[in-house]
Image (cartoon, rainbow, N blue to C red):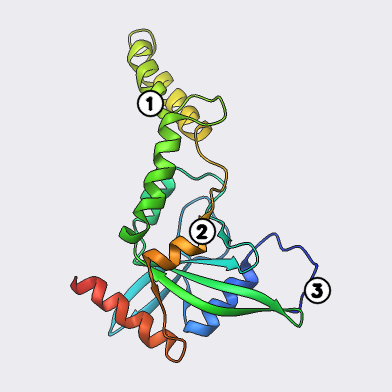
Amino acid sequence: MKRKANERVTQDDSRENKQIKIFGLNRLGSGRSNKYLPDVWIVVNGKKYSLELKSCDKRKGQISTSRDFGIDKVEQWRKNDGFLFGLWEMKDGEEEFLEHVFCTYEQLQPFFQKQIEKQRKGVADRAGLSEWAEAHNVLSEELSYEQLGRLERTFRKGTKLNDPRMSWKNVKKWGTTLNSSDLTGHLGKLLKEKDNG
């Protein structure tokens, strides 16, 4: 689908679809859902691997993560076999990928830990999960298990971060830039190495 160079894109579906085509990937889920599913899967030597897809506008150098980002999202992403990042720019009204980087969950730990710490400490004059732990101890003497559970779910949701960004520079530093002449082969090799490592 062609876009005008100045048209604002709110979803990255078109870029995900291009990544899927470039790497010969298969969609895991069908659209948006309340339950987390990795974006895609690929079979390498008879084994199925799941991946999360992300892309980065070269002009901005920042990668969107998730609207409600926190400990829960980090735990969901642990289920992935890897993360596939693509750097793109607009050329003649089309989004064109320039390079791709593969990262494992472990390689992204510096980013994940920084965001978890923010959720624990709290941001923008809001309490964090550390303060909830103290409040929980006090309230547990007065409230029922069910009431505490509802309060905890509310608190965990309220402390989540609004789409913290990863920098492309860090992703390149932490991960492996894929060989542009054999993208799918190089990705498969890295997935197998991760299994054997």
Sequence-wise first label, 3 or 2: 3
**Where does the C terminus fall, quadrant-wise?**
bottom left
Specify the quadrant of the image occupied by residue 51: bottom left
Q: Distance between the residues labelled 3 and 2?
A: 26 Å
Badge 3: how crowded within 10 Å, few (<14), some, or many (20+)?
few
Query: For the view shown, which residue lies furthest in the left direction?
Result: 196
Please tell me which residue is depicted at 41% across the width and 21% down the height of the picture: 131
The answer to whether 107 appears left or right of 24 in the picture is left
Residue beneath disc 2: 167
The answer to whether 130 appears left or right of 122 in the picture is left
Sequence-wise first label, 3 or 1: 3
Q: In this view, does 122 lie above or below 135?
A: below
- Residue 36: percent from left, percent from top: 46, 54
- Residue 2: percent from left, percent from top: 76, 79
Q: How far apart are marks 1 and 2 (CA)?
A: 27 Å
Specify the quadrant of the image occupied by residue 50: bottom left
Badge 2: how crowded within 10 Å, few (<14), some, or many (20+)?
some
Sequence-wise first label, 1 or 2: 1
Badge 1: how crowded within 10 Å, few (<14), some, or many (20+)?
some
Please tell me which residue is depicted at 37% across the width and 57% down the height of the picture: 108
Kindly identify the amino acid type of the residue bearing the numbered disc 1. Ser
Residue beneath disc 3: 4
Residue beneath disc 1: 130
Secondary structure of the residue carrying numbered label 1: helix
Foreground: 38 or 123? 123
Please tell me which residue is depicted at 60% across the width and 74% down the height of the picture: 88
**Where does the N terminus fall, quadrant-wise?**
bottom right
- Residue 57: percent from left, percent from top: 62, 67
Specify the quadrant of the image occupied by residue 120: top left
Kindly identify the amino acid type of the residue bearing the numbered disc 2. Ser
- Residue 145: percent from left, percent from top: 35, 20
